[in-house]
Amino acid sequence: MSAEPALRTSPLTWWRLLAPTALDPDTQLRLRAALLDAPPLPSPNWDAACRADPAAALGVALNALAGATVLPGRLDRAMSAILLCAALEDAASIELLVHVLGRRARRWADLGALWLARAWCSTSRRGPDRIVAALGR
């Protein structure tokens, strides 16, 4: 699956379109810029989530997932913060991304989501010692 068409879409949809190998440092910076430009989610941890703080991103995403049926517009922003952390090899963010993509694959018979979930399953996972210099932290 080529990342080229997906990169022409809104960065806030990339969590359901891009494989781990497509998230090079330039793509991560574009994603972060899109998160910072998007309307903030109503969470005191939103700024930290946009700076790729895994704990903050997980909290924001879990809240968005809990209300996804009522407020589906929040899901792309929340999962984009998770994608940013997953690109930096945060294990918990990768696990949540795999879970949500797998659920999407089952619910909508979405083979692309299934393929992405499998691709993320094979991604290396590091703990909090990952390098985030590319994001200017």
Image (cartoon, rainbow, N blue to C red):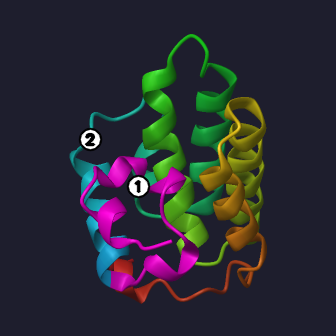
Please identify the quadrant where the C terminus is shown: bottom left
Looking at the picture, does residue 85 appear above or below residue 44? below
State the residue at coordinates (46%, 39%).
76
Q: Give the Cα distance between marks 2 and 1.
A: 10 Å
Q: Residue 4, position in %: x, y?
A: 32, 71
Q: Categorize mark 1 by other alpha carbons within 10 Å: few (<14), some (14-19), many (20+).
A: many
Task: Say the numbered circle drawn on residue 38.
Answer: 2
> Given the image, on which type of amino acid does mark 1 rest?
Cys
Q: Amino acid at mark 2?
A: Ala
| Disc 2 packing (10 Å; few <14; some 14–19; many ≥20) | few
Outermost residue on the top side: it is 70
Q: Position of residue 36 (x, y in %)?
A: 27, 51
Indicate whether 57 appears above or below 87.
above
Q: Nearer the viewer, residue 78 or 55?
A: 78
SS class, disc 2: loop
Q: How many marks?
A: 2
Dot label at residue 16: none
Residue stretch rendered in magenta on the structure: 1-25
- Residue drawn 56% across the image and 75% down it: 20
User: Disc 1 designates what residue?
Assistant: 50
Q: Is residue 100 left or right of residue 70?
A: right
Instruction: State yes or no: residue 10 in magenta.
Output: yes
Q: Is residue 14 above or below residue 24?
A: above
Q: Where residue 50 sits: x, y (%)?
A: 41, 55
Residue 69 falls in image quadrant: top right
Mark whose residue sits in front, 2 or 1: 2
Q: Secondary structure at mark 1?
A: helix
